[in-house]
Each structure stands twice: as structure tokens, then as C-alpha cells.
Amino acid sequence: MLHQCRLLQAKSGRTMDVILLQLLNGLDKGGAYALIALGLTLIFGTLGVVNFAHGALFMLGAFCAVTFNKLLSLEVVTTDPTKTTAWGSPLEIRTPYVEAMLGDFGTWMLNYSVPMSILLAVPVMLLIGFVMERGLIKHFYKRPHADQILVTFGLAIVLQEIIKAIYGANPIPQSAPDLVRGAADIGSIFGFDPGVIVYPYWRMVYLAFAGAVIAAVFAFLQFTTFGMVVRAGMADRDTVGLLGINIERRFTVVFAIAAVVAGLAGVMYTPILPPDYHMGMDFLVLSFVVVVVGGMGSLPGAVAAGFLLGILQSFASMNEVKAILPGIDQIIIYLVAVVILLVRPRGLMGRKGVMEN
Amino acid sequence: MSLIRKPLNRRSILRAGAMGGAALATPTIFTSGAWSAGYLNEPTGAEVVLGFNVPQTGAYADEGADELRAYQLAVKHLNGEGDGGLLNTFSSKELQGGVNGKKVAYVTGDTQTKSDAARASAKRMIEKDGAVMITGGSSSGVAIAVQSLCQEAGVIFMAGLTHSNDTTGKDKRKNGFRHFFNTEMSGAALAPVLKNNYGTDRKAYHLTADYTWGWSQEESIKKYTEGMGWETTAAVRTPLGAGDFSQYITPVLNSGADVLVLNHYGKDMVNSLTQAVQFGLRDKQVNGKDFVIIVPLYSRLMAQGAGENVKGIFGSTNWHWSLQDEGSKAFVKSFGQEYGFPPSQAAHTCYVQALLYADAAQRAGTFDPCAIAAALEGFEFDGMGNGPTLYRADDHQCFKDVLVVKGKENPTSQFDLLEVVEVTPRSQVEYPADMLGGELGTCNNGA
């Protein structure tokens, strides 16, 4: 009897470990979904544009990190005439310039290249967002959503192919700084057996970062005059225009901010998922589902749905769940979207009148 | 018989237009040029056209690019240009510039690593460009689909990188040939090394790519590891291109397993291995033993993607550029001088396949696919970098030594990522021809 009780205890303890781990997984995945969906819904809510190139902005952000790392890793190439390669040419000895010039500080910079690449990503993504909106998107404001989808999807493919032509098709690994490279034994802090709830430090950093960016965007919209005008524009664009405010210029800035949010999400995701040219597309479809579930044009809805779907996707991947419903991990997000749209056609926090005419 | 010429009217113009259009739209496969010969696409000019069907876009584009480089080098060598590469070390000395007196030309297609796209591009190369042979590819799903198309059309298919047992097992075809090894051989080669390094009392957890190659590899590795006493705790299928594998990796932590077998390739392997290492699996102790990760199929290009995470991890490979036999050295020198970096295993197998096809055509004295198939069946050769090799007649699978490799602890360059820890002799990886099922069927020359 005692033995059975212990077995049951052990089993329930194990289930609890697995649930906690999948919850953490869902939170960091949800963080990425929420960041992308936040930008998507910001653009949709302000400009009324369905931006299928938003995933490509996430990918471009990731490649800002790759570019920054490559710039830091530019090497002084010297040859060693005493040694040759397997194909007979002199052996090349490569030393990064920053290390050669700055010594230990150069090594430190290389180590922190991912977080430091935010310095490159913010201006680059602002510029990309600005050029994209002024150069292409603004010509499609008054066109049907189908046209907007086609042109932004086409743009996404063009951007992908440019990145592939420059960086190749293979993933390019990016390391988290040494300080946060390992995994934390969270379980032992909360009284679980050591080594059963282990979670990578960088994923926790990502979750905190996602939270901070989301909070910053909300604070910006909520507590600044600029944000107030944007919110007013989202509610009633025509009236704001009649008040003599150039809402279009503000919306251009909003588009650029959305591009920066997607770009930053991409930068910080690189140590989790080695970036390749296709990573934006992988996230795009899911992010659209997130926006639809959250409610088109609803910022809190996008964030809530991002975390909700991330967590649900993680739980659906548990072996115990898949044993009952095989393949559920592949369809759970779409299943939830179908149910939500049937029960609440506007999504969780959708506004009346958006995409309803 | 009336001598009065009928005037042109709208109806006759439409009729003539329709007939002309139908004639133009008919694929060349049905036109007299193709059918009058004894076999499909018999070359009549000074050139013979080969079709290189490789992934030029999609997840395996880098591997495809390396395959294409190898094919271009092979064409150069076949036409008597360059340093001759492996022709200098190949045991058969039939090829002396050109094949059957014809210059080798080529056309390329993009498989996109999708079966339908690969079949469409192979079909185009056969019907429109007159290719007598199709070769290439970086996926078993694609290889099986294209092999079946080549069988139906009546041309030879020389498979590129395809590792599933099914290619020369249940889906084998008389017109299809594979030089690359398969999952059965990987299992047979890896098992003794794993036993020596990790013992016989281990619990393995498999994460498997959910398609033909993943299933095949999982089955083979399970068969050999269970055969030496390991227990399989779980085998979980993961969707191809999942990206984030964290939700599949976390259950491993508390599963009681002390080995993680990643039946993933390409981008999936890079991502799953990177994330498994991030979750601290390599630093973990389970059942009083160090937790270990195994990647049964390795490639240098993948190792480059996974970076330092590959250190100390065992796997198998068809060929590696660091081998020191004369054939490997000749190929690395030739490829390295041409492109400035060493070839991948995908490049090697594709280059060798192109040479083997040309040699068989030369020995047969024709490009008739059935004569070439007969020349390849049971062909024994050496000097291609894998030691003495047999193209087994019963299943068109090459049998040769298999390499067991390990991620290098202290790489000396960006290419020096894997070290060969054992060359498993051919005799140890051979299996009966009927073990994997399937029927070769009869040869089709398209006539």
C-alpha cells in the first residue's frame, strides 16, 4: 500500500514537472508570437493593412544580429607558408579584427554580439519600416485586403530571396553570452528534485525581454500624446483628420515602430533558433492566427492570444496528450481558432465593426 | 479530284491552328525523334545530355549547391578537362575524354526538396531537354518520387543524397541506383561504437522526423541498439521543419532516458541539437550515467550549422573529406582547387554517381538505360574514396565501408568539424537483399 502511494506520488510529481516545463515553454514561445502579433495588429489597427511581410521583418531583425556578428567577426587573414590545406593552398590563419585591435574588450564584444546587435537593429528596422510604408504600403491603403495580402506576401518572398542570396539557405547559429548560456535548475528553487525542471537562461531572458517590449509599446500608446493621437486614429481616423492632425505621418511612425518590435523579437530569438531565410514564414501563419483569435485590431487581444496559443501548443505536444489525440500538436492552434471564431466571431477582444463589412 | 483551291476561311484557319497547336503541345516524348530510336532520348548529335536535379531553393539549397558544384566538376573531368579528379584513381580505366565519343552536356532542375516539384523538373529535363539520365537530390521522399518517374519514363536515375532504406528497399526500381549508404548500414556501423563508448545498459529516447527517412532511421537504430541491450523509452515523431523543438525536448528531461537519438537531418537537426544542448541535456546525469546525444546521420554542412554543439557527438557519414586514401585525396584536391573549400558528402556521392554512370555507358557502348543498368549491376570498383565497393545487382544498393564520426573537440578550421573514429568494414554492414522488401521489376528504356 505504502509502495503504491509512493508510486502515485512519484507519478503525480512527474506530471507536475512536465506541466510546469511545458508552461515555461509555452510562455517563451508565446512571447515570440505575442511580439509579432502585436506589430501585426498595430499595423492593421492603424493603417488597416493586412501585412503578410511582417514575418519577413522578424527574419530581417534576426539577420541584423547575424550581420552584426559577422561585422564583429571580420578577420585579419594571414597565411602560414609552412602548412597547406588538403587541396594544396597555404593554410589561412584568421583572427577577428576586434580581438586583434581591442584585445579582451573585443572578445567581450563578440561574446555579447546578440544583445549588442539591438543597437544595429533599431535604426535599421526603423529605416526598413519607413521605406516599406512610404515606398509600397501607402499605395495600397485604399485597395482591397486581397491586394494588400498579395503585395505584402510578394514582398516577403523578395526579402527572403535577398537574404538567401547573401547568407545562403543553411541556419547560421548565434550564441547567447556565456553568462546566460546554460540552463537553470528552477525546480530545486521550488523544492522539486534537482535536475527535473531545468530551463535555459536565455529563454528566460527572452520572456522578460518580450514582457518589457510589450509593456513599452503599451506605455508609449497609453501615456504619450503621440500614443493618444494614434489611439484616437485607430478609433476614428476621419474625425482625427478633421481636427487637422496629419494622422498619416503618425501612422508611418507606427509602421516603423511595428517593424522595430518584430525586428527586436527576431534579434533576441537567434540564440534559440539559428536563423535562416525562411524563419519569418514559419512564424507568420501562426501569428495571423494569433491576431484573429485575439481579435483583429486589439492589442491586448494579440498579446493574450499569443501567450494562450503558445501554452496550448506546448501542452498539446505532451506525450500523454498525443497518446489520446495523435497529431493534436499539429492542429491545436487552428482548432482553437475555429472554436473561438464560432463562439466569438470577433475574437477574444475584437472590436465591433473591424473586418465585418 | 477537284483542282479548285479552297479559299482560306475562318473555319479552316481555326482547324489548322488547333492541329498545329496540338502538335506543338505534344511532349517530345511522343514525337518521332524520340520514338524512332531504340530507346528514349538516344543522343544523335555530338553531345549527350545529363539532368542534374538538385535542391536549388528550399531548406537543402546549400547542399544542392554543393551537389551542383560536384556535377559540374564531374562533367569537366568526363570531357577530359581539369586534373581528372577521381578518374585518376578509379579502378575502371574505360573513360578517356567524353562518353561513347560524345561530349557530356548537362541541364539542371530545382527539386525545391518537394516531391511534386522534383518530378516536374525531372519530367521537363527528360521530355524537353532530352536528358538520358537524371541524378541528384537531398531527400529520400524526393528520391523515391523521382526514381519512380524515371522508371515510368525509361531513363536511368542515379540517386544523390538519400538515406532511407526504402530507396533501395520497398520502393526500389530497376532503373534506379544508389551509391549513398542507408539507415540499416548506419545502425550496423554505429551500434558497436556506441556499445564500446556507452555500454549495454542504456535507455534511449528518439525524436524522429515524421517522414519516410525519419521512420526508416528510427527503425534501424532501434533494431541495433535494442539488439545490444538498450531499452527504448519513447519514440516521438516531430513535424518536419518544426523550428522550435523545446516542447518535444522537455519531456526527455524526466523520461528516465539517458540517451537522446535525434533522427533529424538538415535544418531540423541543427535546431533540435542546439535546443537539446541549451536545455542542459549534455550536462545531465541520469541513472548514474552521463546523458548523451546521438545524431545517426551527420553531414559537415549540418555540423557547421550546429556549431560547437556537435562536439563529442557520435554519428555516421557516407564519406568525409579528411580521409587519407588516394581517391579521397584526389577528389578533395580537385574540388578544393576549383572552389576553395572541401567537398561535402553530398558532393562526393553525386560526383561518384556521375562518373559511375558514364563509366557504365562507356563499358556498355551505348546510352540505352537497360544496357547501362546491366553494366552497373554487380559492378565492383575501387578508388572512389570508400574502398572496394559493390553495386549489388539484387537491389541496386552500393556496399562499401561506413564511417562512424564524432564532433571534433578542438576543430582547427571552419571545415574541420568531424573526426572519423571508425571505418566500419563493408562486411559488417551487409545484409540480405530481400530483407528490406520491394521488387526491382523490369527495366524500361522508354521505347
Image (cartoon, rainbow, N blue to C red):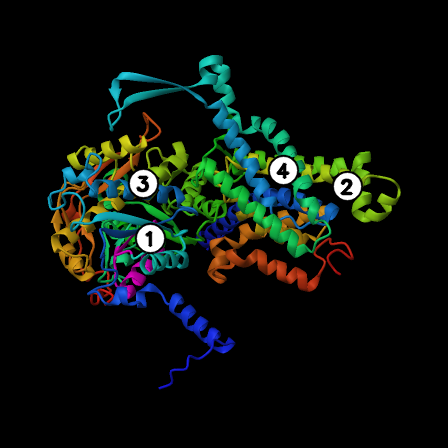
Q: Chain of mark 1?
A: B
Residue highlighted by disc 2: A248
- The amino acid sitting under disc 1 is Glu
Q: Chain of mark 4?
A: A
Residue highlighted by disc 3: B69
Can residue B9 be seen here? The reply is yes
- Dot 2 falls on a residue whose secondary structure is helix
Q: Which residue is found at the position 79% from the left and 43% from the top?
A: A231
In this view, the residue farthest toward the bottom is: B1
Residue highlighted by disc 4: A210
User: What's the CA distance linking mark 4 and mark 2?
Assistant: 28 Å
Is residue A213 found inside the magenta-colored segment of the image? Answer: no
Give the left or right position of residue A145, taking residue B404 as reference: right
Q: Chain of mark 2?
A: A
User: What's the CA distance linking mark 2 and mark 1?
Assistant: 57 Å
Magenta stretch in the rendered image = B131-157
- Dot 1 falls on a residue whose secondary structure is helix
The residue nearer to you, when weighing B117 against A108, is: B117
Marker disc for residue B218: 1
- Residue B74, position in %: x, y? 24, 42
In this view, the residue farthest toward the front is: B3
**Quadrant in which the C terminus of chain A is drawn:** bottom right
Is residue B137 found inside the magenta-colored segment of the image? Answer: yes
